[in-house]
Image (spheres, rainbow, N blue to C red):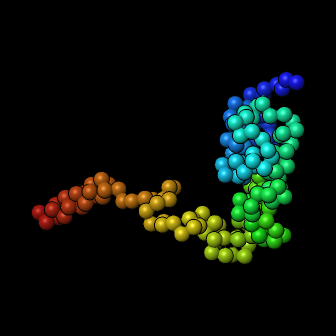
């Protein structure tokens, strides 16, 4: 029974390099970090030294099952990315486009209820308490142009001297 090795693997909406080890390949999926990837490999009972391109369809379906519902497979709730969801109240794990859509809807909810974070998001400012006096100043006037001011001061000084002479 020989398996074919795939150099590029399409898995859960992401192109993954088939030459990477399984845990590192899974880490390329949006919503799956390194710690969760190692836990998924252990829960799916896959050899951690195996390469992504060498996995069979059955093994990939087991991995996908574990990623979609990690709590059912014994992964602790602290490792999921959506604890105590606002709408459902359950712990769940989202990946890919679902995660991006949920984050966007959370930000829109904050804007609608006009919480502090929502107001900061709508104004395009820093949200998590970072300083804004010196950082994050792109697109705005950052400082005073010293050269222009010096030339203007010299020109004003020359005019005053000419007026005094008259």
User: In front: 109, or 50?
Assistant: 50
Q: Is residue 113 visible?
A: yes
Give the answer, above or below, for where 47 lies relative to 19: below
Between 36 and 32, the one lying in front of the other is 36
Q: Quadrant of residue 28?
A: top right
Residue 30 rendering spot, x and y as whole percentages: 72, 49
Question: Residue at 50% across / 59% down in the picture?
Answer: 136
Left or right: residue 99 versus residue 117 is right
Residue 155: x and y in percent read: 24, 57
Query: In this picture, is 104 found above or below 42?
Result: below
Question: Residue at left 73%, top 72%?
Answer: 112
- Residue 133 percent across, percent down from the top left: 44, 66
**Residue at image x 87%, y 36%?**
57
Tell me which corner region of the image, top left, top right, bottom left or bottom right, holds residue 22. Answer: top right
**The furthest residue to the left:** 165
Q: Image point 36% across, 59% down: which residue? A: 144
The vertical placement of 102 against 25, above or below, is: below
**The C terminus appears in which quarter of the rendering?**
bottom left
Question: Visible in this render: residue 103?
Answer: no
Q: Quadrant of the N terminus?
A: top right
Q: What count of labels does the image hold?
A: 0
């Amino acid at each position: 029974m020989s398996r074919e090795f795939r150099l590029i693997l399409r898995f859960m909406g992401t192109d993954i390099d088939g030459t990477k080890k399984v845990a590192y390949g899974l880490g390329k999926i949006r919503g799956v970090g390194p710690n969760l990837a190692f836990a998924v490999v252990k829960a799916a009972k896959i050899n951690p030294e195996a390469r992504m391109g060498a996995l069979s369809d059955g093994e990939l379906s087991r991995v996908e099952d574990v990623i979609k519902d990690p709590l059912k497979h014994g992964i602790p709730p602290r490792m999921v990315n959506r604890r105590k969801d606002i709408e459902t109240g359950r712990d769940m794990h989202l990946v890919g486009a679902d995660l991006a859509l949920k984050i966007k809807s959370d930000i829109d909810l904050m804007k609608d209820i006009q919480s502090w974070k929502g107001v900061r998001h709508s104004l395009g400012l820093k949200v998590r308490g970072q300083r804004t006096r010196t950082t994050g100043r792109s697109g705005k006037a950052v400082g005073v142009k010293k050269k222009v001011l010096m030339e203007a001061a010299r020109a004003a000084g020359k005019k005053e001297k000419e007026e005094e002479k008259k």
